Image (cartoon, helix red, strand yellow):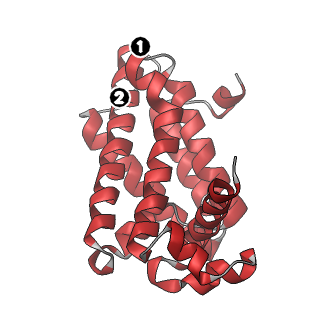
Amino acid sequence: MNNRTDTRERILDSAEQLLATRGYHGFSYQDISRPLGIKNAAVHYHFPTKADLGVAIVRRYRDMLKAASDGFMKFGGSARLHLEAYLDFFMKEACENQTMCPMGVLTADYFSIPESMREEGSKLEQEVFAMLIRVLEVGREQGELHFEGEPRTKAVMMMSVLQGARQLARMMGSDVLATAIEELRRELYVEPSTAAA
């Protein structure tokens, strides 16, 4: 990794943390540059506008989701294990950083963020729901998951519960999110020990 790439990644790491803790409007380029020991101009070099930076953060999250779920989306596999990996990631991120995920931030700031971020956020939302729907479809077909109704309806319910619980966890503690996740597991007959299998 060369110096420019390293600086870009460090900027993204810092900005992602700030976005997740403060929201889009809660930080400036100076909040990024000062702790990193670089000039504001260095941030502008990589991300000319804050909208460019916001889009890069969401795109990075989309790339991470794609890398984690691409094999399952193409070839299937154990729906339980894939769902457990997603729930564990969701819980770990919330507990370690007391943050909202990018989708939660985009939802909260939706009417005041740049159009380019809305568009990138919509792609992220579609991809998350596509992944959850696929997990639910495959899980039901394979007898791993049991639920009433359509997979899309269940996916909407799951994401609503997870996003809401993650936001509440910032105020009320991680037990709120842990309880929501355990309830989802109970409804879908996903054993908590599945992740260790």
Circle 1 residue: 142
**Image check: 140 left or right of 83?**
left
Is 125 above or below relative to 144? below
Is 166 above or below relative to 1? below
Rendering coords of residue 41 (x, y %): 57, 80
Circle 2 residue: 134
In the picture, the quarter occupied by the C terminus is: top right
Which of pointers 1 and 2 lies earlier in the amino acid sequence?
2
Q: Quadrant of residue 106?
A: bottom left
Rendering coords of residue 142 (x, y %): 41, 13
- Depth check, front residue: 38 or 75: 38
Identify which residue is drawn at 56% across, 43% down: 87
Rendering coords of residue 60 (x, y %): 50, 51
Is 48 above or below relative to 89? below
Q: Which mark is residue 8?
A: none
| Number of numbered discs | 2
Identify which residue is drawn at 75% across, 78% down: 37
State the SS at label 1: loop
For label 2, the crowd category at 10 Å Cα-Cα, with few meaning under 14, some 14 to 19 and many 20 or more, is many
Q: Which amino acid type corresponds to the residue marked 1 in the rendered image?
A: Gln
Identify which residue is drawn at 63% across, 54% down: 5
* Residues under numbered marks 1 and 2 in contact, where contact means CB atoms less than 8 Å apart: no
State the SS at label 2: helix
Rendering coords of residue 81 (x, y %): 57, 26
Is 193 above or below relative to 181? above
Q: Quadrant of residue 6?
A: bottom right
Q: Which amino acid type corresponds to the residue marked 2 in the rendered image?
A: Arg
Residue 13 visible in the displayed image: yes
Front tag of 1 and 2: 2
- Depth check, front residue: 33 or 151: 33
Residue 175 visible in the displayed image: no
